[in-house]
Image (cartoon, grey):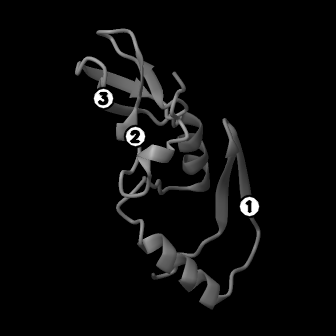
């Protein structure tokens, strides 16, 4: 782990509502435990490295976008989409019905029958 240490944590409280927690000192044992947890997810998400100023600029410039395809369950049309992750729904370009962007979910961690984005018909 060389000289790398955890010096702050960013929390997302809601839509465009973030908090930075810093100025704490973790014990060596606690820091090791956190790194062990983070290593389980080292192939997910993304990270940025640079100076404090470069990181702040990157956060300001970053608008995460997701691109993908979703097959309409009503007409089997393949829909291309680009979204910022704030919505998990789109309108099918072929039949005009609202469909869920199921491809945004990690299928190993969700139960589709309990989808929080499901629309009532």
Residue at point 42% right, 45% down? 112
Q: Which residue is mark 1?
A: 21
Residue farthest to the front, as pictured: 121
Disc on the earlier residue, 1 or 2: 1
Q: Which residue is mark 3?
A: 70
Left or right: where does residue 98 sit relative to residue 33?
left
Residues at marks 1 and 3, CA–CA distance in whole angstroms: 37 Å
Mark 1, other Cα within 10 Å: few <14 / some 14–19 / many ≥20: few
Q: Is residue 9 above or below residue 99?
A: below
Left of 65 or right of it: where is 80?
left
Element type where label 3 sits in the image:
strand
Q: What percent of the width, then of the height, locates residue 92?
A: 35, 15
Residue 88: assigned label: none
Q: Are marks 1 and 3 in contact (CB under 8 Å)?
A: no
Q: Position of residue 73 (x, y in %)?
A: 30, 26
Q: Position of residue 97 (x, y in %)?
A: 40, 14
């Amino acid at each position: 782990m060389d000289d790398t240490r955890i010096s702050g944590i960013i929390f997302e409280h809601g839509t465009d509502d973030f908090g930075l927690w810093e100025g704490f000192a973790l014990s060596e044992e606690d820091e090791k435990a956190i790194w062990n947890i983070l290593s389980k997810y080292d192939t997910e998400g993304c990270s940025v490295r640079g100076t404090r100023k470069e990181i702040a600029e990157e956060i300001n410039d970053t608008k995460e976008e997701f691109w993908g395809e979703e097959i309409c369950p009503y007409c089997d049309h393949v829909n291309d989409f680009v979204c910022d992750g704030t919505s998990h729904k789109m309108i099918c370009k072929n039949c005009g019905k609202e469909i869920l962007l199921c491809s945004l979910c990690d299928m190993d961690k969700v139960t589709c029958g309990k989808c929080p984005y499901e629309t009532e018909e």
